[in-house]
Amino acid sequence: EGNIRFKVLDPVDFIISKLRRGTQEDEEDALEVARHSQIRPDEILQRVKSMRLPKDLESLYFLRRVERFLKRLEGMEQDGDP
């Protein structure tokens, strides 16, 4: 019925938005999206490096969350977890 359009974030952008928020549930959601969409850690890192972040405490916390997330994602890849 009618013309309904949905716009969704690119999976990498969705993962980054979840990591920006930073709850444990958000990190688990981001891992699930990365697994399902077969996103590699280097894709996420490349996108984060292209961002212009303010030099503030929240940006530091975000970068630490990204680092922790990438380690988890790399660990899953090494374990063969799809």
Image: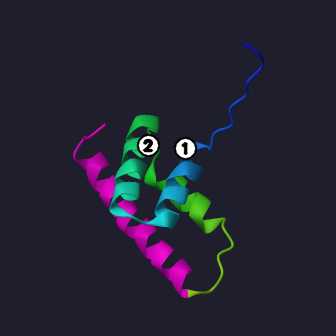
Residue type at the position of mark 1: Pro
Q: In the rendered image, which quarter contains the C terminus? A: top left
Q: Where are the magenta residues, as a range?
A: 57-82
Determine whether the residue tagged by mark 2 lies in a helix, strand or loop.
Answer: helix
x, y percentage for residue 21?
A: 49, 65
Residue in the picture at 60% in, 67% down: 49
Color style of the picture: rainbow
- The residue where tag 1 is placed is 11
Residue type at the position of mark 2: Val
- The residue where tag 2 is placed is 33
- Label 2: few (<14), some (14–19) or many (≥20) C-alpha neighbours in 10 Å: some
Determine whether the residue tagged by mark 1 lies in a helix, strand or loop.
Answer: helix
Residue in the picture at 25% in, 41% down: 80
Q: In the rendered image, which quarter contains the N terminus? A: top right
Name the image quarter holding residue 27: bottom left
x, y percentage for residue 47?
A: 60, 58
Q: What's the CA distance linking mark 1 and mark 2? A: 7 Å
Label 1 close to label 2 by CB (< 8 Å): yes
